[in-house]
Amino acid sequence: MRLNQKFLTISLAFSLGILSACNGSPGDSTNHAELNELKAKSDEQQKAIQELSGQVRTLNEEGNRLKSLVSQLTDGVLAQKQTLQNLKQAPAPVPPAPKPTYKKSFSKPAKRSTFRKPTPKPTPKPTLRKRR
């Protein structure tokens, strides 16, 4: 990137030197116009170079950050691998002894619905009104 910047600076200085050496020529106004154009182009190129160098800096910073994250991730994976290997090499755990089963000495109570008597349906009472 700096090589391009140096090349542009040298080429601009060379072209400005040639144009300034030709100041006494009859086409002096055209030389000044060309000189102004070259200065404008040089300014634009300098701005573009600064912008690109800023982008390159941010990309380099992001690349370094990614490298550190990858190294952290690698360390974590290696630690997990070592833990898995340790677990595979460890003896199998002894299962707990079965609990003794006791026989219940009481029986379940009967459901309440068996003790209930069905309620009779109400019978209609005679009324004093005549039916039509």
Image (cartoon, rainbow, N blue to C red):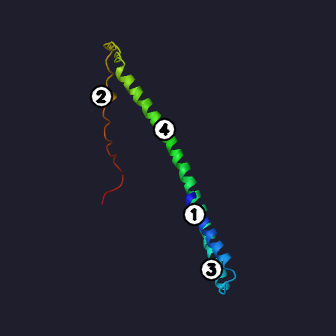
Q: Report the Cα–Cα distance between label 1 and label 2.
A: 107 Å
**Residue that badge 4 annotates:** 71
Q: Report the Cα–Cα distance between label 4 and label 1.
A: 39 Å
Q: Report the Cα–Cα distance between label 4 and label 2.
A: 74 Å
Which one is closest to the eye, mark 2 or mark 3?
3
User: What x and y, as percent, mark residue 31?
Assistant: 64, 81
Q: Report the Cα–Cα distance between label 3 and label 4.
A: 55 Å
* Sequence order check, earlier mark of 4 and 2: 4
Quadrant into which the N terminus falls: bottom right
Give the residue at x 64% y 68%: 13
**Residue that badge 3 annotates:** 34
Quarter assignment of residue 79: top left
Q: Dot 4, crowdedness within 10 Å: few (<14), some or many (≥20)? A: few
Q: Is residue 11 visible?
A: yes
Q: Report the Cα–Cα distance between label 3 and label 1.
A: 20 Å
Give the residue at x 60% y 73%: 41
**Which numbered dot is residue 127?**
none
Quarter assignment of residue 53: bottom right
**Residue that badge 2 annotates:** 114
User: What x and y, as percent, mark residue 25?
Assistant: 67, 84
User: What x and y, as percent, mark residue 11?
Assistant: 59, 68
**Residue that badge 1 annotates:** 7
